[in-house]
């Protein structure tokens, strides 16, 4: 094999790797999760009956964060769960939830 062919193979391999990394479904899902979490939390604050659904979904995100060893993300999601439990008991802390969601965007 000539050096030109080797360089061509390296270039094609680089492009394929870059292409597959950019299409990684986990990355695409994570960017949507912020919006899902925000909508769930806001629906919980508007209607207390929707808090259980929000808790269930956020708990799923928290479990996935633990599995993926994203412990700082998991911690923020646990804090959000606690906040929603308090909201379900009519102990609203909307300022705290905004801060938690901002942290989730940063650490997840």
Image (cartoon, helix red, strand yellow):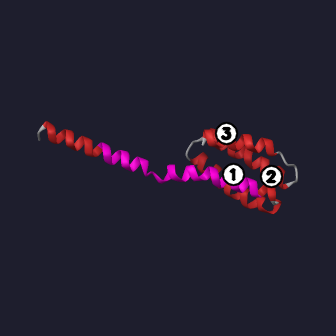
Does dot 1 land on a helix, a strand or a loop? Answer: helix
Is 32 on the left or on the right of 98, as rendered? left
Which disc number belongs to residue 66?
none
Neighbourhood count class around disc 2 (C-alpha, 10 Å): few under 14, some 14–19, many 20 upward: some
Dot 3 or dot 1, earlier in sequence? 1
Is 40 on the left or on the right of 17, as rendered? right
* Residue 28 screen position, x and y as percent: 51, 52
Dot 3 or dot 2, earlier in sequence? 2
Q: Report the residue at 42% width, 48% height from top.
A: 22
- For the N terminus, the quadrant is top left
Q: Mark 3 points at which residue?
A: 103
The answer to the question of whether label 2 and label 1 lie on touching residues, with beta carbons closer than 8 A, is no
Which disc number belongs to residue 38?
1
- Asked if residue 38 lies in the magenta stretch, the reply is yes
Does dot 2 land on a helix, a strand or a loop? Answer: helix
* Residue 46 screen position, x and y as percent: 80, 58
For the stretch drawn in magenta, what is the main secondary structure?
helix
Which residues, given as a range, are shown in magenta?
14-43
Is residue 80 something one can see in this rendering?
yes
What separation in Å lies between label 2 and label 1 (alpha carbons)?
Answer: 16 Å
Q: Report the residue at 18% width, 40% height from top.
A: 6
- For the C terminus, the quadrant is top right
């Amino acid at each position: 094999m000539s050096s030109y062919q080797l360089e061509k193979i390296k270039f094609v391999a680089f492009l394929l790797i870059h292409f597959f990394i950019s299409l990684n479904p986990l990355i695409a899902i994570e960017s949507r999760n912020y919006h899902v979490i925000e909508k769930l939390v806001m629906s919980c604050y508007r209607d207390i009956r929707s808090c259980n659904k929000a808790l269930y979904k956020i708990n799923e995100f928290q479990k996935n964060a633990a599995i993926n060893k994203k412990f700082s993300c998991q911690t923020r999601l646990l804090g959000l769960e606690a906040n929603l439990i308090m909201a379900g008991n009519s102990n609203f802390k909307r300022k705290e939830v905004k801060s938690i969601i901002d942290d989730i965007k940063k650490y997840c």
